[in-house]
């Protein structure tokens, strides 16, 4: 999306480290004096947080795929209208943990719903807002799933573990979906290797942003 603000989304399979890296990146950008909004999907608003509780609850394992899709779209619509669009319009840098590409990867490639219809729904829900850059933290699906399950056990996140209950084939399709999207539009996507330590991955992420989004002015923070 063009305008005063910058819109960056971070995507990846379960356990790829998105949430941690988004938080660290937000701190780094703030250190340059820029206004940063860190948010996530589903969530980011009161309505979105309520929908998130339903979508990620493992007790909802029988949810119909279309019901799941429409709940995501409803939460996203509220997120865009209440938080994302106003933040970008006032010149902030918005960092979002998942956005429309998660719908294509999870509900499209994962659930095997029609990609064309998903793109139309995304367009409708967002009124055409597109990230300036989408970074995919890429990790083998089995490794990511193991990480996610360990994290949920350590942090007591069992109420948000519905997708961790899907079989490995589902998560493989999701990963392949992300990589397919990246190949289709290399100008908007960047794939970053998410294996290794948190510090190693963060350095790769920062290097990618320095190269792809120079107007973020991250060189200032790196030299400091």
Image (cartoon, helix red, strand yellow):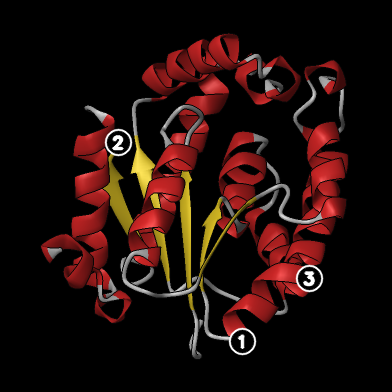
- Label 2 residue SS: loop
Position of residue 82 in the picture relative to residue 116 (left or right): right
Residue 137 drawn at (x, y percent): 36, 43
At label 2, counting other C-alpha atoms closer than 10 Å, the crowd grade (few under 14, some 14-19, many 20 or more) is many
Image: 66 above or below 121: above
Q: Which residue is drawn at 51% across and 17% down?
A: 151
Q: Name the residue under label 2.
A: 194
Q: Mark 3 points at which residue?
A: 82
> In terms of image quadrants, where is residue 27?
bottom left
Q: Is residue 128 visible?
A: no
Q: Which residue is drawn at 85% across and 16% down?
A: 59
Q: Indicate the quadrant containing the C terminus: top left, top right, bottom left or bottom right.
A: bottom left
Residue sitting nearer the eye, 5 or 105: 5
> In terms of image quadrants, where is residue 166?
top right
The residues tagged by marks 3 and 1 sit, at their Cα atoms, a distance apart of 12 Å
Mark 3 or 1, nearer chain start: 3
Residue sitting nearer the eye, 54 or 169: 54
Image: 151 above or below 178: above
Are discs 3 and 1 less than 8 Å apart at CB? Answer: no
Mark 1 or 2, nearer chain start: 1
Residue 33 drawn at (x, y percent): 37, 74
Q: Mark 1 points at which residue?
A: 89
The residues tagged by marks 2 and 3 sit, at their Cα atoms, a distance apart of 31 Å
Residue 140 drawn at (x, y percent): 34, 26
């Amino acid at each position: 999306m063009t305008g005063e603000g910058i819109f960056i989304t971070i995507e990846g399979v379960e356990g790829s480290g998105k949430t941690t890296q988004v938080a660290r990146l937000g701190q780094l950008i703030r250190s340059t004096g820029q206004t940063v909004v860190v948010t996530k999907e589903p969530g980011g608003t009161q309505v979105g947080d309520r929908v998130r509780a339903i979508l990620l609850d493992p007790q909802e394992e029988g949810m119909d795929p279309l019901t799941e899709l429409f709940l995501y779209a409803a939460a996203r619509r509220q997120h865009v209208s209440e938080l994302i669009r106003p933040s970008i319009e006032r010149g902030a840098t918005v960092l979002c943990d998942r956005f429309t590409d998660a719908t294509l990867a999870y509900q499209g490639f994962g659930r095997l719903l029609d990609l064309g219809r998903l793109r139309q729904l995304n367009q409708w829900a967002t009124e055409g807002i597109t990230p300036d850059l989408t970074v995919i933290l890429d990790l083998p699906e089995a490794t990511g799933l193991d990480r996610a399950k360990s994290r949920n056990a350590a942090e007591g996140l069992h109420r948000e573990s519905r997708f961790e209950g899907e079989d490995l084939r589902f998560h493989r399709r999701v990963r392949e979906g992300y990589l397919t999207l990246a190949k289709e539009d290399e100008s908007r996507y960047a794939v970053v290797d998410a294996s290794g330590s948190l510090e190693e991955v963060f350095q790769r992420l920062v290097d990618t942003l320095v190269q792809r989004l120079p107007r973020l002015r991250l060189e200032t923070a790196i030299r400091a």
